[in-house]
Image (cartoon, grey):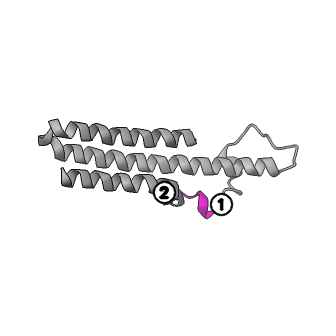
Amino acid sequence: MANNSFYIKGWDLTLFVAVVALKKDASQYSGYLLLALIVSTIAFCLLDAYYLQQERIFRKIYNYLAESNSESINYFSINPVLYKDILKGEMLSYRSSLISTSILLFHIPMFVAVFIFFVLF
């Protein structure tokens, strides 16, 4: 799942560079390009937070199964619905994933770069 986050950040950066390259030739469409870039950056940020939340849930279930000594546990079933009792916690919420360091340290500078680029150029 960390690989998905890597790809999302790569696509976000690639799209930003593509819009920067297109803005010079399509200056009459700069408003549409800005809107498309803002919407895509928000979508990538939300998707990145979702994958981080899923990874945290998977790790919590995996750690629970690794520490348990019961022979009746099916180790090949990591369905979150079956483990609702252990998945309670503040760190597993979508909001905590959205404001995590790994999300904010990439996507906030992307938003700043988008606005600086469109204001200055």
Q: Which mark is residue 11?
A: none
| x and y percentages locating residue 79 in the rendered image | 67, 43
Residue 108, quarter of picture: bottom left
Horizontal side, residue 101 vs residue 38: left or right: right
Q: What kind of element bears circle 1?
A: loop
Residue 51 shown in magenta = no
Dots 2 and 1: beta carbons under 8 Å? no
In the image, 65 versus 25, the foreground residue is 25
Q: Which is the main secondary structure of the residues drawn in magenta?
A: helix
Report the residue at 11% width, 41% height from top.
Answer: 28
| x and y percentages locating residue 3 in the rendered image | 55, 39
Within 10 Å of disc 2 (Cα), the crowding (few <14, some 14-19, many 20+) is: some
Horizontal side, residue 49 vs residue 11: left or right: right
Q: Which residues make up the magenta segment?
A: 88-95
Q: The disc labelled 2 sits on which kind of residue?
A: Leu
Report the residue at 24% width, 51% height from top.
Answer: 117
Earlier sequence position, callout 2 versus callout 1 = 1
Residue at which label 1 appears: 88
- Quadrant containing the N terminus is top right
Report the residue at 88% width, 43% height from top.
Answer: 71
Q: Which mark is residue 98?
A: 2
